Image: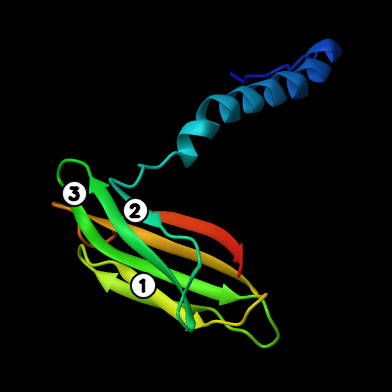
Amino acid sequence: MSWHLAVFYDSAMIRLAPVVSMACLALGSTIGGGVAHAGPEAPCTYTLSPPEVSGTVVTSTAVIAGCGAAAGPYSAVACIQPLDKDSVIQCAQAHGADPATVSVAYHPGVTYIATGRGCAAWALQPASPPCQILGPLTATL
């Protein structure tokens, strides 16, 4: 006994298949796209002060403002970059609830940009702390 399989193609179905496939892909990426990139928000809130003159230096400070349940402050980083020739970014880091304060030499008329980061420690997950990006805050002093 031999079996023969006959396949019949409908030309309308062949043209419709790519359209249906693309519609399914678009729907799948629309439904799952937003969820795939969503991450937990940092459980602690930090603030960053704008660049300000203090004597002969310009300073900025990153400080803990508060934390939610089961979280605490892990670290803070504050950075300042003067926008003048050959300037480099300067950063300072502090651990726990200590504020991070950074200073650079003051030059009148220069624009300074402050940035930073505040990270929290989860009670059960200290290996990869969630962080909040701070700034940029710009000031011409």
Residue named by callout 1? 101
Colour setup of the view: rainbow
Residue named by callout 3? 71
The crowd level at tag 3 (other Cα within 10 Å; few <14, some 14-19, many 20+) is some
Residue 100 appears at what percent x and percent y? 33, 70
Quick one: SS at disc 3?
strand
The quadrant holding residue 83 is: bottom right
Residue 79 appears at what percent x and percent y? 47, 72
Q: Amino acid at mark 2?
A: Tyr
The crowd level at tag 2 (other Cα within 10 Å; few <14, some 14-19, many 20+) is many
**Is residue 16 depicted above or below 93 in this figure?**
above
Q: Quadrant of the N terminus?
A: top right
**Is residue 42 depicted above or below 63 in this figure?**
above
Q: Nearer the viewer, residue 54 or 27?
A: 54
The crowd level at tag 1 (other Cα within 10 Å; few <14, some 14-19, many 20+) is many
**Is residue 17 depicted above or below 99 in this figure?**
above
Q: Amino acid at mark 3?
A: Ala
Residue at 71% from the left image edge and 18% from the top image edge: 20
- Specify which label sits upstream in the sequence, 1 or 3: 3
Residue named by callout 2? 46
Residue 138 as seen in the image, left or right of residue 49: right
Residue 41 appears at what percent x and percent y? 36, 43
